[in-house]
Image: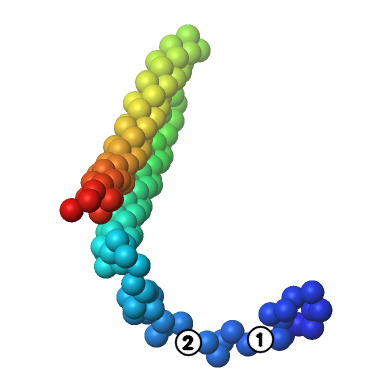
Amino acid sequence: MSNNPFNPFANIDFSKFDLSKFDLTKLLGDVKIPGFDMDAIMAAQRKNIEALTAANRAAVEGMQAVAQRQAEILSQAMGEVSSIAQQLSAAGNPQEMTTKQAELARKAFEQALANMRELAEMVSKSNTEAFAIINKRVTESLQELKSLVTPK
């Protein structure tokens, strides 16, 4: 604990507070405001949290797939390096070596572009899935709000 005179909470030991038993639904469940359905609001917020959790899960799974594919690409590239070294060492004259180097550079460039395109598509797909989950929930939430506000 610090003795900071500008912090009124400096001498409070927050570890003594057990927030695991704090239930917001019980606290707000007793609040009665005419025309305000607290249960519906709490259910909507629960659905919002579930949608955010699902979107985060989709994003994390997408990032994991991209990282796994990057590792596969790196492994493949390392295998190709030894093959390239063998091909270049087999070249006889300087002109043949230059031709092989140019061909290998072209193939490497094309492969790098293909890999970048594949990774970009994976990221785009992951983002689209996560956005679709959020978009669906926003649409549902607006419908729920409309039904709560519409007079019965």
Confirm or deny contact between disc 1 and disc 2 (CB under 8 A).
Answer: no
Q: Is residue 55 above or below residue 4?
A: above
Q: Is residue 120 visible?
A: yes
Can residue 46 be seen here? The reply is no
**Label 2: how many Cα within 10 Å (few below 14, some 14–19, many 20+):** few
Of the numbered discs in the image, which one, if any, rests on residue 12? 1
Residue 11 versus residue 145: which sits nearer the camera?
Answer: 145
Q: Which label belongs to residue 118? A: none
Tally the marks. 2
Q: Secondary structure at mark 1?
A: loop
Q: Secondary structure at mark 2?
A: loop
Q: Nearer the viewer, residue 93 or 39?
A: 39
Q: How is the image coloured?
A: rainbow
Tell me the quadrant of the picture where the N terminus can be found. bottom right
Q: Residue at the spot x=32%, y=32% of the render?
A: 121
Q: Earlier in the sequence, mark 1 or mark 2?
A: 1
Residue farthest to the left, as pictured: 152
Instruction: From the top left corner, tell me how far across and down residue 42 is, in percent.
Output: 31, 65
Q: Position of residue 114 (x, y in %)?
A: 34, 26
Which amino acid, by three-letter code, is at mark 2? Asp
Q: Residue furthest bottom?
A: 16
Q: Residue at x 34, y 48 (%)?
A: 59
**Label 2 sits on residue:** 18
Please provide percent x and percent y for residue 4.
79, 78
Residue depicted at x 63% and y 87%: 13
Q: Residue at x 41, y 17 (%)?
A: 106
Does 109 sit left or right of 145 as displayed?
Answer: right
